[in-house]
Image (cartoon, helix red, strand yellow):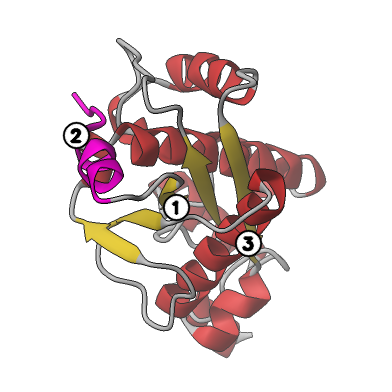
Amino acid sequence: MPDLALESHHRLNGCLRIAGVDEAGRGPLAGPVVAAAVILPADYGHARLNDSKKLTAAVRGELHAEITGDDRILFAFALASVEEIDRLNILRATHLAMARAVEALVVKAGGTPDMVLIDGLPVRNFAWPQQAVVKGDSLSLSIAAASIIAKVERDRIMHGLDAGFPQYGFAGHKGYGTAAHLAALQDHGPSPHHRRSFQPVAQLTLAL
């Protein structure tokens, strides 16, 4: 289970504001990529908080409500659009969403973080001190909290897109390349919310 060992290490080295950052939605064929940034209290603990991928949708929803409803916790989330994903590529768009999430957190916190713990690999040209943590959402409570917020907020966006484009089933598969989604793409072609730079959407777009 994740804990605050990484955060405590940086606090011992003089860092007071330590933010965890994670994203949701790098792999889907449709919808934006969403990133979240979270600063937890130094004494924070939670028995159920974990990597969002290891939790059910119901538990993620409960934890999202707890995190965002706790006045001690600072959080923000941001996205990069489908258009930005197609223009920049998914890696750069993900980094853009992460930077936007931290920028939004800076406004809430009234100052910049002393350290940002990022799930995965380092982010190039990042404006804040960072530590990249492979599988960080399973190690750091701050990153795990960010993973919950990013995932729940992105799922809500996909539910919203489903209302306008029910033929694709976005509410069910959240834009991932399931058999049902691929079949809907074959039947209806890409929607405005599909990533034209992703296969097999690109092949269908070229065929139109």
| Residue at the spot 28% in from the left edge and 28% down from the top edge | 54
Residue kind at label 3, given as amino acid type: Glu
Q: Position of residue 137 (x, y in %)?
A: 28, 40
Residue 14 in the magenta stretch? The answer is no
Q: What element carries label 3?
A: helix
Q: The magenta stretch spans which residues?
A: 1-13
Figure quadrant of the N terminus: top left
Residue kind at label 2, given as amino acid type: Ala
Q: Is mark 2 on a helix, strand or loop?
A: helix
Residue 78 visible somewhere in the drawing:
yes
| Residue at the spot 58% in from the left edge and 87% down from the top edge | 87
Mark 2: few, some, or many residues within 10 Å (few <14, many ≥20)?
few
Measured in 3D between alpha carbons, the distance from the residue under mark 3 to the one under mark 2, in whole angstroms, is: 25 Å
From this view, report whether residue 12 is shown above or below residue 66.
below
In the image, farthest residue toward the top: 47
**15 or 198: nearer the eye?**
15
Mark 1: few, some, or many residues within 10 Å (few <14, many ≥20)?
many
Mark closer to the chain start, 1 or 3:
1
| Residue at the spot 32% in from the left edge and 50% down from the top edge | 14
Q: Where is residue 177 in the image (x, y as percent from the top left)?
A: 41, 55
User: On the image, numbered disc 2 is attached to which residue?
Assistant: 5
Q: Are circles 2 and 1 on residues that touch, CB within 8 Å?
A: no
Mark closer to the chain start, 3 or 2:
2
User: On the image, numbered disc 1 is attached to which residue?
Assistant: 23
User: On the image, numbered disc 3 is attached to which residue?
Assistant: 103
Mark closer to the chain start, 2 or 1:
2
Residue 4 in the magenta stretch? The answer is yes
Measured in 3D between alpha carbons, the distance from the residue under mark 2 to the one under mark 1, in whole angstroms, is: 21 Å
Q: Position of residue 58 (x, y in %)?
A: 49, 15
Instruction: Mark 2 vs mark 1: give the one in front.
Output: 2
